[in-house]
Amino acid sequence: MPEKIIRDPVHDVIAFRMERPVDALLFKLLNATEFQRLRRIHQLGMANLAYPGADHSRYSHSLGVMETARKILDQLRQSFSIDPEQETTCLAAALLHDLGHGPLSHVFERVSGIHHERITQRIIMDPDSDVHQILVKHDKLMPERIVQFFNGQPTRTFFCDILSSQLDADRLDYLLRDNYMTGSRYGDYDLNWLLHAFTIDEGENRLAVNWKGVSAVEAYLQSRHHMYRNVYFHKVVRSAEGMVKLALQRAKRLAVQDRLKWPERDSSVYKSLLGQRFTIAEFRDLDDISVWHCFKLWTNADDPILAGLCRGLLFRDLFKTIDLTKCMDAEQARAAVKRAMTAIEEAGGEPNYDLFYDEPVDTPYEIYGDPGTGNEIMVVEPDGTLSRFADISPMTQALNRELMFRRIHVKGQWAKLVLSTIA
C-alpha cells in the first residue's frame, strides 16, 4: 500500500505507512470532518496582529503533537517494550486532543462557558461524528479508551505523561511551532536531543529523562518562559484578546435581551454564545470564519459599543496599553483601575467596555512540595537513581517564580485621561 506523506515546517516529513493499522487509523482520523474543522481555527488566536506570520492552525499543531508523541514512543521502544494497543490509544489521543477547541483561541471558550476538553470527549463518544465511526470501525472500545486516557484512567502511566505533563508532546510541539511561525526566535530548543533523552521510570511506570538530557530540558523550559513573556503575553495580543472578549460579552448581552439581529437563532455561533446545546453537525460549523463573519456584520450594528469594538478588531485599532507591573502591586493596580473607570464614566464613556484590566500569569516550571506527586520532571542519574529535576538544575528555582504582568488596556481616546488618574 502507498505511503502518505505530509510536509511540515517543524517536523519536516510526517509519514503514514498505510500497511500499519495504527497509521491507517491515524490517517483516516486526519481526514474526518471534525478534524478538518481545525484547519479553520487559528492556533494563536489574535497573535497575528502582533506577529503577521502567526496564521497557523490547530490542525497543524494537532498533527505535530501526534508526530512528537510518535517520536517519543520510537525512542522509548529502543529500550522498553511498548504495548501496541496503548500506543494506538496514545497516538489517537494526541491527534484528537484539541478536537473540541472553539474559535479564537481560548477567548470564546471563556465567554461561552463551553470547555473544549468536554466537547472533545463528546465528539469522540457521539455515534453521529465521523471520528467516532472511524474509531469503532477500528475497535469498538477505542472511543471509550481514548476518553479514559484523557482522564488518566484507569491508571496514569508514561503514555499519559507523553500527552499531558510538564514535558509533554503538546508543549514540545507548540513551542517550536509558535516560535517558527511568529518568527520570534525566543522559543527554539533542541528537540532531537531531548527526544533522545526520554526514558521510563520503571518503578512508577512514568516518563522521565536521563541525565544527559538535563541541559536540553533547561533550554526547553527557558523557551517556554520566553514564549510566554514575548508572544503569548505580548501587550498587543492581550489587548486584542480582551477586545474580543468584550465584543462577545456585549453580543451575548444583546442576545439575551433579544436585541442581536445577527447571527440567526439556530446558528452554531448564537447557540454556543448563549451556552445552548448544539449537535455535532452544528459544531463543525463553529470556527474562526463564522465568528469573524459576525464581527464584520456587527461593525454596522445598531449598538455603538458592539460596532466600535468590532471595527477596532477588524481594522487593528486596538486599545492602548498602560503597564503597571513595575510601579504597582496588585492592590494598588486595582485601585488605579477603579479611578480610571470612574474618570471615563464622568467623561461620558462606557467604563465596562472602554477599559479592562489584565493580569496574565504563568509559572514556567512548577516545583511541588511532595516529591511523590508524579507531576515533576524526573531524571535518571548515571548510577540509576531517580531524582527530581528541581533537585538537579539550579535554574528551576528561577523558573518556579510566576511570570506576571499588570496592565490597563484602554480605548485610545481615553488613554491620556487614564494616565492622568494613575500618575
Image (cartoon, helix red, strand yellow):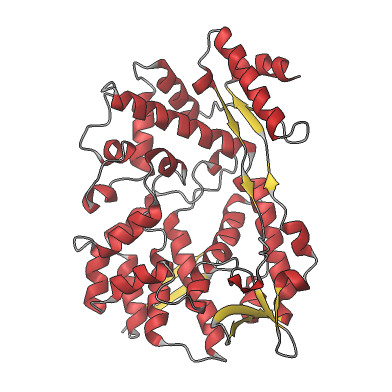
Q: Name above or below for residue 102 compared with residue 387.
A: above
The answer to which of 302 and 403 lies nearer the viewer is: 403
Q: Name above or below for residue 42 compared with residue 13.
A: above
Residue at the outermost right position: 394
Q: Is residue 186 visible?
A: no
The answer to which of 17 and 290 lies nearer the viewer is: 290
Going 48% across and 73% down the picture, which residue do you hit?
A: 160
Which quadrant, please, contains the C terminus?
top right
Residue at the outermost front position: 370
Going 39% across and 50% down the picture, which residue do you hit?
A: 115
Residue 3: x percent and y percent? 37, 80
Going 63% across and 71% down the picture, which residue do you hit?
A: 191
Going 57% across and 53% down the picture, which residue do you hit?
A: 181
Relative side of 377 to 95, left or right: right
Relative side of 148 to 33, left or right: right
Relative side of 182 to 73, left or right: right
The answer to which of 321 and 272 lies nearer the viewer is: 272
Q: Is residue 40 visible?
A: yes
Name the image quarter holding residue 271. Answer: top left
Residue 273: x percent and y percent? 33, 37
Q: Name above or below for residue 45 compared with residue 81.
A: above
Which quadrant, please, contains the N terminus?
bottom left
- Number of marks present in the image shown: 0
Name the image quarter holding residue 89. Answer: bottom left
Name the image quarter holding residue 332. Answer: top right
Relative side of 278 to 114, left or right: left
Residue at the outermost top position: 347
Residue 212: x percent and y percent? 73, 81
Residue 227: x percent and y percent? 65, 52
